Image: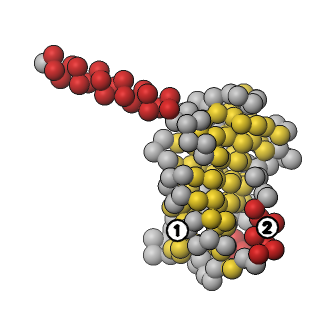
Amino acid sequence: MKYFLFLFIFSISLMAKEVSKESLRVRSVLGAAFCSKKPLKKGDTLKPDCKLSTHARSNVYLEIEKSKEVFSFGENSKGMILPQNIIRLDAGILRIKADKGYVIKTPQAHIDAKKGDYLIQTSPFLQETELISLEGSATLKSITDSSERALVSQNYWGGIGGRFGNKIGDLLSLSSEQNKVFKVILD
């Protein structure tokens, strides 16, 4: 019984260290950004249940302190960064520069993003999700049709819903000029 209690306390201690090691810190804020209703400022550490939102002409840049992974939420964005490498993006635009894989959930799609640099935009008004891979590859999957999926490789752009329709369709190849334009968004 003592051995079991020791293992239980030891595993709780390791989990607590893991959570603190992966804490999200606000790197910078331009304009107005909030965690629930609390205004965010540089250096803040986010709570696990933080509902992020930004106003017009506002951005918030977050980083995981130990890995320097960066999550940038653009203007009029709403979302959450959840445990187990899940990000929910309900509205707006997100740039993610990741050293490991993440699942990004939007109202229209699930995106399995590997290590890389991605722009994801979702619009409740148009009911669509777009994915641009600036580096790496990610799988764009419909939430309504499990067979509807596409691998979006580096320098490609794909979307579903709204203007794109219910099918993902042909991916667009980005020219070097287009790639330069997208590379500076939320960088």
Left or right of 24, for residue 83: left
Which amino acid, mark 1?
Thr
Residue 53 higher or lower than 158, as above or below: above
Seen from this angle, which residue lies furthest bottom?
170
Tell me whether the residue at label 2 lies in contact with that at label 1, contact meaning CB atoms closer than 8 angstroms. no
Which amino acid, mark 2?
Lys
Q: Residue at x 26, y 24 (%)?
A: 8
Q: Residues within 10 Å of mark 1 (few under 14, many from 20)?
A: some
Q: Position of residue 77 (x, y in %)?
A: 73, 48
Residues under labels 2 and 1: Cα distance?
22 Å
Q: Residue at x 45, y 75 (%)?
A: 147
Residue 172 higher or lower than 44, as above or below: below
Quadrant of the frame with the N terminus: top left
Q: Residue at x 68, y 53 (%)?
A: 94
> Which structural element holds mark 1?
strand
> Which structural element holds mark 2?
helix
Q: Position of residue 159 (x, y in %)?
A: 65, 71
- Give residue 180's mark: 2
Number of the front mark, 2 or 1:
2
Instruction: Please say which color scheme the image uses.
Output: secondary structure
- Give residue 34's mark: none
Is residue 14 at least partly visible in the picture?
A: yes
Q: How many marks?
A: 2
Seen from this angle, which residue lies furthest top?
2
Q: Residues within 10 Å of mark 2 (few under 14, many from 20)?
A: few
Residue 183 higher or lower than 177, as above or below: above
Q: Which residue is mark 1?
A: 139
Q: Position of residue 29 (x, y in %)?
A: 78, 37
Q: Position of residue 118 (x, y in %)?
A: 64, 60
Q: Residue at x 78, y 57 (%)?
A: 185
Is residue 142 at least partly visible in the picture?
A: no
Seen from this angle, which residue lies furthest left?
1
